[in-house]
Image (tube, rainbow, N blue to C red):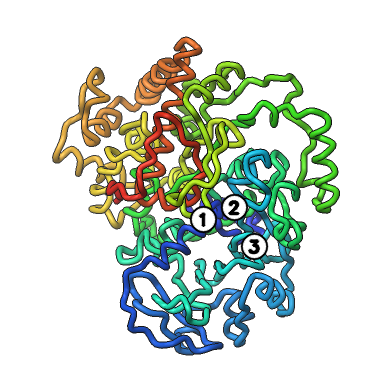
Amino acid sequence: MLGKTLKSLKLNATRLYLAGFLTLILIISADWFASIQATSKQPISPNCNPIVPDKLYRYIATLDSCLTPMSDREIQKQLNDPFAIALLRQGIFPANAEAISQAIADSNLGYSQTSYVVGEGFQIPLTTASREAPRSLRYVVTWGVDENDAQIMLGTLAPASQSSVNDIISWDTKANKYNFYALRHQVEDPTSPQAWSWAGDSTLAPQPPTMKKNCFNCHHNGLPIMKELEIPWNNWHSDRAAIASTIVPTAVANESFFQQRRGAKIFESVIRANFQNYYSHWLETRIRKQNDTIEISDVDRMLRHLTVNTTINLKSSNVQSDKENTSPGENHRDLEKLNFSANKTRVSDVSLETPNLVPEVDVTGVPPTDTFLSDTIFQSFLGLDYSSLSVTFSREDYDAYLKDKNFALVGTKSSKREDIPLYRYAGSTYFAYFVPQISAEDIYITRLLLNSQILTDKFVASILMVDYKNPLFSEKRARLQKYAQKIPKAKIVNGVSNIPGNFAAKIKAVAKACKAENFDTCSAEEQFLYTWELPDNQWQQLTSVRLQAYVDSFANLEPDKQLDRLMRLSIEQSDRFASTLPFCKLFEFKSLIPETDFSQLSPCQTTADRP
């Protein structure tokens, strides 16, 4: 049963994957670039040898103090992805984004190129900031058999012709890992020539010396990510919000990467196929069948996807914050048509349709799925019967609230969010109610663990009901990981996994189940045991009732109180995202999140690091 399930899951993921990879990343929403800048801040020795042209180097933060030339043996052993094989191992060291594009085109890989554009500043109107003002624009450029595949990916700032940031992630099919590369100067010597350096691979992401360091500051699981993964893909060029040539700097508008941009919907599908393929293979290699027994390794790493947020996504409603964008006049629509035509943007990338032509469209679908509760897992995977919270803000009330609480997006001269403000735009993100979301990676691997009979429905519910009102950034639930670390290996005998029982036994040795009426004030251990010890024929119903009561506590509020409570909750979530390691490393650009009268965007230094 287990083998068939894994085989089926892997086959489905592979079909989606289409060669998959490297779609990598980039999460680009700043994430990749955040890791780039983190590299330059490493406190290391200045006694490094000069860079020698046409050599491949290694620099892995916390392991290396300088860029060090790689030996032929090390290169052959570690670097077997297409970027290394077709270029670096052939002595081809392109010096910028255009040279990278040309070198790949001239290679024997036969890949097609696809480019995407993302930038928090594209939503700032020209009346607030000129088109030449910094708008945090970046490119993600991928290469693969077609646009649905990405074996190599480049992350660079826009305009690429002026960017010194050029990072590559490339997929090693045989080793089932991503290699990370950076074009950089020697350590503490910004005047040295730039050289290509290997920055590590996926296997280093969970290792203590390199976990949450350098590349893995943002790629928390060693995988490519896209922060705004779901429609409407706030900040991305897409069929819901086009980044027009008239809003970006002239140098950007004239670049082929921009002119050939594709929509975020394509990038989302590649990203999803990527991590599905990766995790299916990862799980398969940690399961070994011995007669009637299935042996499982790395159990503690599997359970981390439940006890903590290993990474996050960001999600908004599907309605624009600015009613003028929601219901643009005909003149504005005609201008968009002209812009799209001039840029030769493909029709499939651009939507000239507006969600609603009513002058003042209400903000619906608040809060987005998997931001208020773990809805996908609770409802779709565990079959819990409760109604998801989904409310509507009247346009008049929403607009008045933004104005009254001084919501504003702030742009800075550089990409650093702590830099001096350059411009301020009254209002919120392009799409309303933009908040942190449970990651698609954590949700997917939970599904795999359930389908593979490694975990049971009741066990997953027992963990997720710990501090369930905080599905994100829960320090209380994270405390359960110490029990997972005591179970590195496990078995499935006759279709029954011993993980749930072993885990519960370790908690029972130190705690007792709390009482229902005191649930919210109980410890992590007590909350876990409460759900775990419910009768097997009653836990789903009782858990559903508890979740529904929490939903109703918001749904039954008067409209004005409901608006205030949910808006404050969104800011609280954003504040925690902005200040809590390692997630705050994804908050590179100041205009990602609006400032308000009651927001507390603390520096990225909170010590609540996840286990």
Identified at 65% across, 65% down, the residue is 160
Residue 210 in the image, given as x and y percentages of width and height: 35, 65
Residue found at the far left of this picture: 510
Residue at (80% x, 51% y) in the render:
345
* Residue depicted at x 67% and y 75%: 99
Residue toward you, 421 or 65: 421
**In this rendering, position of residue 8 left or right of residue 339:** left
As shown in the figure, which amino acid type bears the numbered disc 1?
Answer: Ser
The residue tagged 3 is 150
- Res. 134 mark: 2
Check if mark 1's residue and mark 2's residue have beta carbons within 8 Å.
Answer: yes
Corner quadrant of residue 307? top left
Label for residue 184? none
The label on residue 414 is 1
- The picture places residue 204, in percent across and down from the top left corner, at 39, 66
Q: Which circle's residue, 1 or 2, is located before the other in the chain?
A: 2
* Front one among 321 and 451: 321
| C-alpha gap between disc 3 and disc 1 | 30 Å
What kind of element bears circle 2? Answer: loop
Q: Characterize the local packing of mark 1: few (<14), some (14-19) or many (20 or more) Cα atoms within 10 angstroms.
A: some
The relative height of residue 176 versus residue 127 in the rendered view (above or below) is below
Left or right placement of residue 509 versus residue 76 in this view: left
Amino acid type shown at disc 2: Pro
Q: Secondary structure at mark 3?
A: loop
Labels 2 and 3: the sequence-earlier one: 2
